[in-house]
Amino acid sequence: MLAPMTPYVCPRCRLRSPADALTWCCPQCRGPWDLEFTSAPVSLTSLASRVNSLWRYEEALPLATGAPRVTLGEGRTPIVPLTDGVSAKLDFLMPTLSFKDRGAVMLAELARRLSPSRVLADSSGNAGTAIAAYCARAGLDCVVYVPEGTSAKKLEQMRAHGAHVTVVPGDREATARAARDAADEPDTFYASHVYNPHFLHGTKTYVYELWEDLGGRLPDTLVVPVGNGTLLLGAALAVEELYGHGLIDTRPALIAVQAEAVAPLAEAFAAGADDLLEPADARPTLAEGIAIPNPPRAAQILRAVRATGGTFLTVTEDQLHSAQVDLARRGLFVEATGVACWAAVRASPPRAGLTVLPLCGAGAKTGLGGGRG
C-alpha cells in the first residue's frame, strides 16, 4: 500500500490534485504545481547519526515516509573558501556531477511509488542525466527529450543509464513544448524539474546542508544562478521553513544571477514587475543551462528574491569565460553555467558577512566554454 502523499495545489488557481495522479500541471491555467506540505523542525543534534544522503532531513521532505527509498548517496557536498568572505558549495560533486540530483531523487522516488509505464523528462543536459540515473536506480523506464546541440558527453551519460533519448529540432523551448505534449499520453509520469514541486523540495536540501555544516546558522548572502529557478525556489523554501521553526534568527538575502544574453527575470525585477515583461530572445550564451526565455515560475522567483531584500545580477560572456578559467586555476573545473555566480561575485563584491555560492555542474561534462543544464 502506498504511503500517504501530499496533494498538489496550483498557486494561481488554488485547484488541488492528489499527488498519486499523473496530472502534471494545473488543468485550468496549465501552470506548475506547488505542494500542500508542512515541514516539521529538524533537530540539529540528531543529524550526526543519520543516513549520509539528503534523506537525513526527513522531517522536511515529502515522501520521507516509507522505506526503502531511492538514493545514490546524493548530497552532503563540501564547502570551500574562495576568498575571506566568499565560499563555494561544490554541488558538482554529486553522483551525476550536478546539483540536479537533489531534485531528481525526489521525482524518481515519487515515480517508483506510482509505477507508470514510463517516466518522461525534458532537459538540455544535467536534469536529463540526473533523471536517467535515478530512474535506472529505481528500475523505471525513462525517456529524455533534449534539444539539438546538447553536449555529446551528456547524451552519452543518459544513454549509458538506459534512457531513451529523443532529440528535438530547435531550442530548449521547442524541446519543452514537445515533452509537454508527450506528457499527456496515458500512464506517463512527467518528471519535470520545473512543473513538479517535489523537485523543489529536493533542491531545498542545499540550504539545509549549509545550515547543518555552519552549526545551525546560514550565510548572510546566498548567490544562486537562475534560469527556471529550481535551486533558488528550493533555497527560499528552506529559508522560510528554518525561520518559521525558529531554527535561524534572520533570513539571508537571495542574489539571483542570470546571463546578460538571456535575462528576462533580471529585466522584470529592474522594472519592478511582478511577472515577466515578455519572454526573452533565446540568444546564444556560454551559460546555456540558465538561458530560459520564459520560466513558468517567474512570478514566484521574483517574489522570493524581493522577500529577502535580494536582487538580480547579470554577467557577460567575457565574465563567464574568465570566471571558468579562474576557478580552474583554483583547482575547480566547473562548466560555464555553473560559474555564473562566481562571475557575478567577482564583478560585484558582496556585502559584509559570509556569502555562499553553488558550483553546480562539472566541467568534465562539457569542457571549457560549454555547459548545458
Image: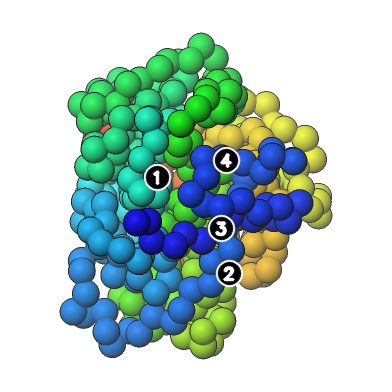
Q: Amino acid at mark 3?
A: Pro
Q: Secondary structure at mark 2?
A: strand
| Quadrant of image for the N terminus | bottom left
Residue 218 is labelled as: none
Residue at coordinates 66% horizontally, 35% vertically from top-left? 294
Per the image, the residue denoted by label 1 is: 114
Q: Secondary structure at mark 1?
A: helix
| Quadrant of image for the C terminus | top left
Residue at coordinates 33% horizontally, 77% vertically from top-left? 212
Sequence-earlier tag: 3 or 4: 3
The answer to whether residue 327 shows anywhere in this view is no
Gap between marks 2 and 4, in whole Å?
34 Å
Placement of 279 over or under 41, stated as above or below: above
Per the image, the residue denoted by label 2 is: 253
Q: Secondary structure at mark 4?
A: loop
Q: Amino acid at mark 4?
A: Thr
Per the image, the residue denoted by label 4 is: 23
Q: Amino acid at mark 2?
A: Ala
| CB under 8 Å between discs 3 and 4 | no
Gap between marks 3 and 2, in whole Å?
30 Å
Per the image, the residue denoted by label 3 is: 7
Placement of 251 over or under 342, stated as above or below: below
Q: Amino acid at mark 1?
A: Leu
Percent x, y for residue 297? Answer: 64, 47
Percent x, y for residue 89? Answer: 34, 60
Front-lying residue, 150 or 49: 49
Q: Within 10 angstroms of label 1, few (less than 14), some, or many (20 or more) residues?
A: some
Q: Nearer the viewer, mark 3 or mark 2?
A: 3
